[in-house]
Amino acid sequence: MGRVTGARGLPVNRDAGRPHASTTAVWTIGGIIVIGWALFIHGSYWRLALSSFGAFVLAYSPVGILVSAGMLWLTRSRWLPSLTRALERHTDRLDALPVSSLGLWIAVAAGLGLYAELMLIRVHASYFQLFAYFKNVSLLSCFLGLGLGYTLGPKRPVATPLVLPLLALQIAAMYVLRYQTPAEALQNPVSEQLAFGIEQANELRHIVSVYGFLAAVFAFNALCFVPLGHLVSRLMGRIEKLRSYSWNLLGSLAGIALFYLLSYLWTPPVVWIALLGVALLPFLLRPASSLVPAGVAVLVAVGILSISFRQTETDLFSPYQILTLNQEPGAPPEIRVNNVYYQRVLDLDRDSATADDSTAYWVNHYDLPYGFAERGAKVLIVGAGTGNDVAAAVRNGAGPIDAVEIDPAILEFGKELHPAAPYQAPNVTPVVADARAFIRRTDDRYDLIVYGLLDSHTLLSGLSGVRLDSYVYTVEAFREARERLNDDGLIVLTFSVIGPELGRKLYLMLEQAFDGEEPLVLSTEYDRGYTFLIGEQMQQRGLTAPAGLTDVTADFASAELAADISTDDWPFFYMPVRTYPASYIAMIVVLLLISLVFVRHLAPGGTGSWSAPCFFLGAGFMLIETKGITELALVYGSTWVVVGAVIAAILVMAFFANLVVIRWGAPRPAVTYGLLIGSLVFGVVVSRSAVAGLAPGLSQLVLTALLTLPLFFSGFAFSTELKRSASVAVALSSNLLGAMLGGFLEYNSMYFGFRSLYVLAIAMYLLAFVGSRRTPAAAPA
């Protein structure tokens, strides 16, 4: 993965004059009290939704007190009965849809649900960096809302006209709060893992602020998705279960395709929510009064999102993240990612360096790798960014240069803005690709492989804790880079070491990848930067620190620093040591309590209306889907295209599994679950190294089959249980709520590694099998 930065400058403090974190903590505590009172005292959907939004706003603004009071007053006013009558008329309209066209209506509704899910995950991560590191929170809140909505299938009324107002309210509020939230308030609550751009939360007030905000967003976002789940469930309940599920899967596939197309086009949230409104329009045409709240919501949201609160800044939504370009007069262009400082586009012309000491300081940093190589050296730069590292290679007379960057928008910024125009140089080949995948696939060898401050501010997908750069910093990745070096080649890796343990990790991984060779570590004193140099026969080569730089190898060679190396199975580079993520458990407990209260108040019959087999199938499916996405991203590259293709392929496999059950029926549960669990056991026994010796294309094919075969059998098992279940509502709601359990269990990989997810999935599928044996088959629908 070549992303991320090839250029850094000095960060700017943008938080001066903002509210202190202790004040924010007071507001957040008030929000927790409001939402707690609403959840445990008032159980209706309206009070839950309105109170949750009040608490959500209250988390970072005292205005939330007025919002909360106003929202709760609405639940007691005459406005609520009028709204209920309007929703009853809307439900009558849905029930009057002809059966002959219900398949298409189901597909559209299901597609909207998945499209909205992907949209909110991106919005949360774009406006608050905390969610860029913890996307699973956003995903699980969507699962909770959709799952609760599915349980309401036969209930009245269906609140489809409220979908756009609720989502627009949330997106607009988050956009405004993005500019009002003090950076010190949303700190990293996970003590076991470091994060760029946000400080570690060590004080109680900071922890309360973060968990309170996460709880409020989780609760309100879940309630936004309840009407969408209810809509799909009610439509599906009118036709045969397996046929309706096929339409659901086709619609979900279309929803994914639409959102990833919008990502490819770099569209902003204004476009996302506008298209959501257009797609919802057919459901709201009759009665016409349903169009009013939806239309007003879209117009208000589009209007607010179109306002620029900082005139010197421009937002651009790449397929991965939000990039903010700040062009202040007299200063080099600055880029922020997910609202946190990231890099500057620097003019490092030698004449300027002579006149400006600070520029000379930057030049010395970027020129460092080329003091260890001959002119004309063949260079690979990963994390090429906006081109500062590439410009240094050109300036120092390098030969052919391959510049790899994963984010096409960052690369485009470099082409358009860099004063040295390095990407336009005749000896430079810019490549938009994942660095690990590029190194594995290329047949070229290099004199220098330069890692340009390659660090990530976002996750690979919403299904795991793996960051975009996680698979770049593993022992196996450095071994693959070693194979691409010429005999006297060097890896030159610069990293902003935000903790000495991370420097120790890098030292140990490079040492192990080069069979015990000791890397040379230099302190560049640039953006906390340390440069690691490693190659063959380092001790015999006698490399020393250039003048003006300090050799700090002994500091990171010291065994007094505790650090565990990252591997492809445990790629958590930003965890200095392998320790159980107790901080995540605390967050899970908070979210689980909210989920249980929502199920108790909103699900018909409380927790009684559920299917045990479908619940545990959902948990197991979530675990192997996470495993599949992360592993296949490792095989084919950690890019958004690969992730989107994997999710789409999973839906396609579920669709064909469902067709098999429709056409030929389902075998006995023992056969279905035997194939499923057997494929998982086979995946545990046959490791990646066992097939690494095969031909490249064949090894990829075998690994893909190992990772996807359990997903096919899982879809086969679910279709079988759906056919046997009492209703679509019970089966799908149980499956989605079970997926939440799988999402919670996925955090165990942070200690046990990703192979452990297979063990957990086997346990879930065994429980599903036991539940299937004890559940009598329902009459055909």
Image (tube, rainbow, N blue to C red):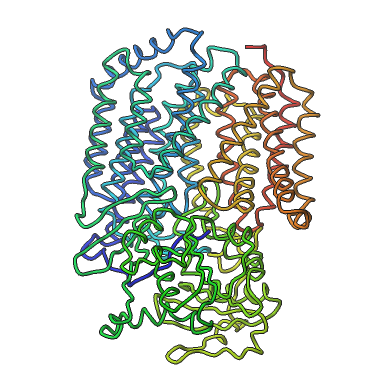
Q: Which quarter of the figure has residue 157? A: top left
Image position, residue 719 (x, y; %): 66, 25
Residue 620, quarter of picture: top right
Say above or below: 445 vs 409: below
The residue at 24%/39% (across/down) is 67
196 left or right of 693 in image: left
What is the residue that sits farthest to the front in this orientation? 426
Q: Nearer the viewer, residue 369 or 72?
A: 369
Asked whether, in this view, residue 64 is left or right of residue 727, the answer is left
Residue 397 drawn at (x, y percent): 45, 78
Q: Quadrant of the C terminus?
A: top right
Residue 203 makes an appearance in the image? no
- Between residue 767 and residue 660, name the one nearer to us: 660
Rendered location of residue 396, percent (x, y): 44, 79
Q: Which residue is depicted at the point 67% across and 69% down?
A: 483
> Based on the displayed image, in which of its 4 quarters is residue 533 positioned?
bottom right
| Residue nearest the observer in this picture, 445 or 330 | 445
Q: Is residue 382 left or right of residue 241?
A: left
Residue shown at 47%/51% (left/top)? 134
Above or below, 585 relative to 386: above
